[in-house]
Image (cartoon, grey):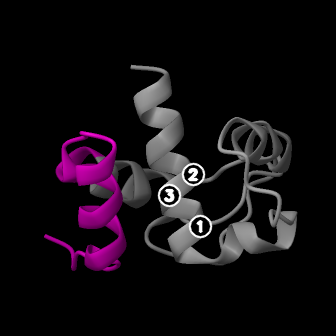
Amino acid sequence: MFKLSYQKQVYTYSKYYNLDPMLVFAVIKVESNFDKNAVSNKGAVGLMQIKPSTAEYISNLLKDDSFDKSKLFDPDLNIRYGCFYLKKND
């Protein structure tokens, strides 16, 4: 078993996007092992390993004019964008 970090964000955004929170926790575990500063060799970053180009696409869809790629390391934004993208592609 592992500690379920970032519960507030996961439960908030999984509920908002109608996702199973255990799916979101599983994605975070597999993608970053709950390391908010994770960076892959392909350039994906943060808890849910989102590429900056994908995040820019998401920010445009969400009309988030305040987006900056450095914010991908912020757990709240990373989980929000990750949940949006999971729901969009389910």
Badge 1 vs badge 2, beta-carbon distance below 8 Å: yes
Against 36, residue 22 (above or below) is above
Which quadrant holds the N terminus?
bottom left
Tell me how far mark 1 sits from mark 2, CA to CA.
Answer: 6 Å
Tell me how far mark 1 sits from mark 3, CA to CA.
Answer: 5 Å
Residue at image position (63%, 66%) is 46
In this rendering, position of residue 84 left or right of residue 16: right
Q: Where residue 4 appears, x then y in whole percent?
A: 23, 75
Q: Name the foreground residue: 72 vs 63.
A: 63
Q: Residue furthest toward the left?
A: 1
Element type at mark 1: helix
Q: Residue under label 3, please give it.
A: 80
In this rendering, position of residue 86 left or right of residue 25: right
Span colored in magenta: 1-23
Q: Amino acid at mark 3?
A: Arg
Report crowding for label 2: few under 14, some 14 to 19, many 20 or more residues within 10 A (C-alpha).
Answer: many
Element type at mark 3: helix
